[in-house]
Image: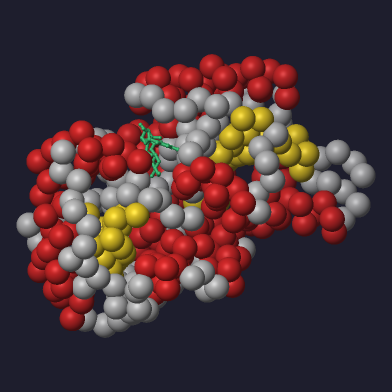
Amino acid sequence: MTVGIKTIIVAGARPNFMKVAPLMKRIAEQDRNSDRGWFDVRLVHTGQHYDEKMSNVFFQELGIPAPDINLGVGSGSQAVQTASVMTSFEPVCVSEKPDWVIVVGDVNSTVACTLVCAKMGIRVAHVEAGLRSFDRAMPEEINRIVTDSLADLLLTPSEDGNQNLRREGVAEERIKLVGNIMIDSLIENLPMSRQSNILNRLGLKSGQFAFVTLHRPSNVDGKESLTAIMAEVERLASWVPVVFPIHPRTRKMLGEFGIMPSEGKGLQLIDPIGYHDSLCLTENARLLLTDSGGLQEEATYFRTPCLTLRPSTERPVTVTMGSNRLTNLDRLAADIEEFLGGPERRGVIPPLWDGGTARRTLDEIIGASRR
Ligand code: UD1
């Protein structure tokens, strides 16, 4: 077999894993089905997320092979984490000499690896390019802008991504609309998520509970805002049973502020859950209340009514076409009442959210390699 394009795929934090899995799977399939290996791939885990429940469980459930290289950077401030990924990723690029590095999403690992490659003249493909919340207070927005300004191939999930990049002056030949890679993973894992027993474990009935996730620094890092949000979550729990898997950042802040709510009265606080359980809760919830990017998309696919506790979203298609609405603390109670009293399914599934994004992504990289 001829050796193909030497490629490093980078995974760093929880929302990266479901974007990397379909790429790894398609590459393995291509290798099996042809006498030519298009890609000679190394998987690098930066270790930005490292807990069993934030990382390992996703590798197992998504069938991602063990990383070839683990940088083990761990937690830190924005600068420390970004710098640690850079200093540990640079020697990997020196020894591996990749033709391409594929980065996904908008986490600190995404921007850190892109910066390293840009300075070493290594080509970068950014999967999930072009998304903008237009809110520079979000660390992820800075990561998106810097990554897209440096990456060579910008693979977008929806047409709004193309428009944002054009507006920023990006040359048309760098932009390719390939669709939403999260949905590749979702579709592939539906048979497994539909076998999840999480509803039984938590004593929940399909269509009769709310699923809550919150971890954005803007919501959880300030005592006043987190206290007010928790009061709203407790109010929601007086209307409908609530399950709230708590992200490590949120658990830490609830502890620091001394405002960890007591369980009972319809509120279940649990540890972070795996991918199949999360899909199962999203598909079966009567309402999702979140500040996550990925969950807005998964709710849109399932057409589950979703309220996003943020002033903006980098995924506007989930609002214009999908089941999502942006909300804030002033309107939350009214929005919840409206959504709980409204249709059980909302919106439609956007174009190219079809399970074919990994294949289109790899085809674009092969095409760009010839240029
Ligand atoms: C990161 C991403 C965000 C993504 C989120 C999903 C950035 C800037 N942010 O935010 O885009 O939506 O992941 O989870 O890259 N911690 C653990 N165990 C872990 C990981 C983190 O205990 O496995 C704790 C650490 O105390 C850390 C805190 O959680 O300080 C936050 O982790 P961090 O990676 O800094 O950012 P996230 O808030 O998770």
State the residue at coordinates (48%, 20%).
84
**Residue nearest the observer in this picture, 187 or 349:** 187
Ligand 1 resides in the quarter of the picture at top left
The structure residue drawn at horizontal position 63% and vertical position 34%, both measured from the top left corner, is 44
Q: How is the image coloured?
A: secondary structure
Q: Is residue 248 visible?
A: yes
Vertical relation: 45 (above or below) 122 = below
The quarter in which the N terminus is drawn is top right
Q: Can residue 150 be seen in this view?
A: no
Q: Tell me residue 347's x, y (percent).
A: 34, 75
From the viewer's side, name the closer residue of 305 and 314.
Answer: 305
Asked if residue 363 lies left or right of residue 201, the reply is right
**Horizontal side of residue 335 vs 196, given as left or right:** left
Left or right: residue 252 versus residue 150 is: left
Q: Percent position (x, y) of residue 249?
A: 32, 39
* Quadrant of the rendered image containing residue 221: top left
Please give the name of the residue rendered at 29% of the width and 72% of the height, measured from the top-left corner.
209
Q: Position of residue 320 (x, y in %)?
A: 31, 66
The x, y position of residue 79, in whole percent, is 37, 21
In the image, 329 versus 52, the foreground residue is 52
Q: Quadrant of the C terminus?
A: top right
